[in-house]
Amino acid sequence: MPRVVLNGVTVDFPFQPYQCQQEYMIKVLECLQKGVNGILESPTGTGKTLCLLCTTLAWREHLRDAVSSLKIAERVQGELFASRSLSSWNAAATSGDPIACYTDIPKIIYASRTHSQLTQVISELRNTSYRPKVCVLGSREQLCIHPEVKQESNHMQIHLCRKKVASRSCHFYNNVEEKSLEQELATPILDIEDLVKNGSKHKVCPYYLSRNMKQQADIIFMPYNYLLDAKSRKAHNIDLKGTVVIFDEAHNVEKICEESASFDLTPRDVASGLEAINQVLEEQARVAQQGELQLEFSADTPSTGLNMELEDIAKLKMILLRLEGAIDAVQLPGDDRGVTKPGSYIFELFAEAQITFQTKGCILESLDQIIQHLAGRTGVFTNTVGLQKLMDIIQIVFSVDPPEGSPGSLVGLGISHSYKVHIHPETSHWRTAQRSDAWSTTTSRKQGKVLSYWCFSPSHSMRELVYQGVRTLILTSGTLAPLSSFALEMQIPFPVCLENPHIIGRNQLWVGVVPRGPDGVQLSSAYDKRFSKECLSSLGKALGNIARVVPQGLLVFFPSYPVMEKSLEFWRAQDLAKKVEVLKPLFVEPRNKGSFSEVIDAYYQRVASPGSSGATFLAVCRGKASEGLDFSDMNGRGVIVTGLPYPPRRDPRVVLKMQFLDELRSRSGAGGQCLSGQEWYQQQASRAVNQAIGRVIRHRHDYGAIFLCDHRFAYADARAQLPSWVRPYLKVYDNFGHVVRDVAQFFRVAQKTMPLPVPQAVTSSVSEREVSVKEATLSSPLLSTRKAMSLDVHVPSLRQRPIGLSASGDSESSLCVEYEQQPISAQQRPVGLLAALEYNEQKGGASEKEQALGSSTLSLRCEKRLSVEQRGGRRKVRLVSHPKEPMAGTQDRAKLFMVAVKQALSQANFNTFTQALQHYKGSDDFEALVASLTCLFAEDPKKHILFKDFYQFVRPHHKQQFEDICFQLTGQGCGYQQSGDPNNCPKVGCTVEKPGQPAVSTYLSDVRKALGSAGCSQLMAALRAYKQDDDLGKVLAVVAALTTAKPEHLSLLQRFGMFVRPHHKPHFLQTCADLTGLPTTSKGLELPGPKEESVTVPSELAHEDTKPGPSMSNKPEKTQSKISSFLRQRPDQSVRSDDCTPEPMKPMKPERSKQ
């Protein structure tokens, strides 16, 4: 790996770093060497994670080398190198106190928002040459493998786990000390999933194993709420003295700092706690009356039993009742606004309930004992959520202990500047009352009051980290702009700052402010305009026009869920959504996070599907899609921001935050540097926008367009708060037509100049997601896509809609239907896939032009041809419904099929596929071929299209068997029909599918319409029995009884021939002729078939076929009179009408095995 010397430190980097990466690493080293804090912004795709890891670990190694040199120097008592003094080693490593021993080398604490992000970071670490000792901290919910504990809720897991650990009854915990030094557990770099996997393998607790590894680790990974939340920091025993703390994805740090130090205490929380205490109190009282109190509660070990007097439990109940009474006693105004008091008021309120600095320790211990006593019990009457929340609240309020001898009120006054107390009516009372909890009856009689204790200064948590002795604090993200306001909020010094440029070129990014729509109406998300018909209509038209010129995936971000839902509702009513769906089907980010993965996976599948025009994903700023989700390459070629997502101005917390900042600014005076409330309000919108537009460029070869569709983006102050890497590309447009023109030109140039994304990478990422979704949620990707694209499921306002406005039809029509499209009939002399494969091997592969063609051409009946003519840099696209030129021969289609297969399979699986083809060619072993194809294509529903497309290359005498197998594995046929010379027309019992629709689905739909659900069920049951016992007589009895009652149903009998096996065809055709009174060759029974050209079978795939027999010419008779007679017939007569070829052929042997 290349070695780069920066600031005297040698950094091993996986490749030669770009200039912006070197600048980033220099700033990181500056922070580390000087022991100061830094705020570093570097756009997504610039490799900041790799830079952080390599730089910090190189610096640690440099420190270790410096310590080693000092140790050696002490032994030899002199300078080691004449040209370089020993002091220079430490000077390059640190400008602070010299590092004298190995234990003084700082640990690295690497924190990110979620464990999934940490898993990506650890994956990057494995790609470097550094192999430090690593530890990942997680919760019991993620790491516990004890079958009894892991099924409990999170806080109950904690207490049940402690109970088992204290009693040594968890054998996983008992193995930690013995097995923690094993090579497989201690040496490798393990992420959270590896910990659980190896813990299960070695029967050792991953949770306590990670805590053990923390002591010796060089770098510790954890979610950053573990650091910012004092309770979590204490629970995980995190020592911060002398450490280097890195917050990656730090754009959320401000919010986490405030939320971890805040709480909302609802009446239900207090009532829940009272219910749990009542239960224990009644239980203890009953036992006391029976004289068995000591025996009952001393049976457990002292650490797990309830070592409390009855009087102490009663006092605890009285404390909760007094707290409830104190909150209820607060007078509120007549409206729902509530009252706001200074932060110090919380201590007065709690003092009325006798909760003070002096009593908090005893109260917390009592609450912990009761929760632990109830741990492991099931049922609603043992719910301890309320008690756990009360414990957390007391720890938040009394987080800082007062100095000895000083009253606690002084401490309260000291921290109250960062807090406000807000008491307001429980607005969600009626909604939460619907939940049937054991304690709901206590509060459902009257509307209670919510006690909110809100922290408005993230500096409270940040200063606490500095107070704990952190050596260096580095905050980094792709979107921290504006940096100045971010640093002001933290209220700690950040001497080192960096706004890094991107590594992309000018031809990779287009940014435009679109102040007006196509109709000239001003676009605005302002409160008074966002729901006007003119604005919504103009925005919908703008979206439709942008969707035409942006290829592949398009992301649309709205300021909030209500705005997105109202916009969709209006667009659906005005048919604007339908026009967009025709171009790019719509997927909507759901409010429910549980169904998010289902929707996003369906979106990825739609974009990646062969022949797809892309898809549109509607999301919300600050939602899950805008936070670190990967929309690289085709998944996100364009991002539309439909407005400035300001926080809700009337929300009490927003109002109080702005008041708090204004008060802070007035106290600091003219010289103080503090944000005003209005500046913070604007900054919140800018940060959300910056986070959303960060989805478009994900790596150095990516490209895309950003549309800022709000006239307020044209203002100078709004543009100034955009990221530094975006501002140089920004252009404000007066005319919407110029927007479309410039974007179309941008993508024409980008598609020519930028390298194509690696198909294997795209395919693998999609398939991995499919596998996880298949295991966790749905078994059918088509059903998943249908559900994901049903906007009514995710947009509540669209559910209660008149039938006339139902969108199911629109949604269905725009579904990805590649699974339902059938292979084109060959119009040229077929050569065969096997011969084409041999030809490819001799030729050395297909040409670039052939590889560039999508595999969708295999399954489209109407060919879509792209004619590209370079005339002034423009591209002419011509759609041809009926091609005038002959279609490509089988040889070309075979090449295209091989390209599609190679893209869909790994190299190893592709080798298996080619070997199976060669074996089939040489041995004609159909069963072995099907076994191989099933393993490769049948398990993954996305690959069903390839399995079905393989049908056209199966040898003729195996086609019927392949059709049946295809139907069994995929639920759809692959288009089986007899072929011969130009005069060969399908007769009775044969069917030709409609273009783009499987014959089986059409037939069953027609049966259901004609015969009803009961009749369809009878037919399906008979068909299943036929597949098992191969008894044609039984199935014909049922089918004839169902389809001959009415003359208009006779066609269903004829079309049933698609299910009849080859050796039963003659008997079936004769029976049809007898029942219908029509000859088998009658033109009235012919179905349309291909008659354009002669199709000749190649010699190596030629097979013997049955000889055509004479046509039957019975006179028409009454249908019902024939039923009993044909059931007694046996297939002893040779009636062959499958082929009209005059030459005699040998009869084909039935090769079907019993199904």
Image (cartoon, rainbow, N blue to C red):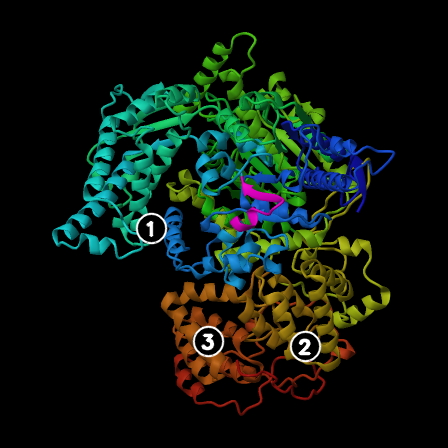
Q: Amino acid at mark 3?
A: Leu
Q: Which residues are magenta?
A: 211-223
**Residue at image mark 2:** 956
**Residue at image mark 1:** 303
Q: Let me know if residue 665 is in the magenta part.
A: no
Name the spot of residue 313 as percent of width and height, x first: 22, 41
Badge 2 crowding class, 10 Å Cα cut-off, few under 14, some 14 to 19, many 20 or more, is some
Q: Is 345 positioned to the left or the right of 912 in the image?
A: left
Can residue 444 be seen by looking at this rendering?
no
Nearer to us of marks 1 and 2 is 1
Disc 3, SS: helix
The answer to which of marks 2 and 3 sits earlier in the sequence is: 2
**Residue at image mark 3:** 1023
Q: Let me know if residue 216 is in the magenta part.
A: yes
Badge 1 crowding class, 10 Å Cα cut-off, few under 14, some 14 to 19, many 20 or more, is some
Q: Amino acid at mark 2?
A: Pro
**Marks 1 and 3, Cα distance to the nearest angstrom?**
67 Å
- Residue nearer the viewer, 246 or 1069: 246
**Marks 2 and 3, Cα distance to the nearest angstrom?**
24 Å
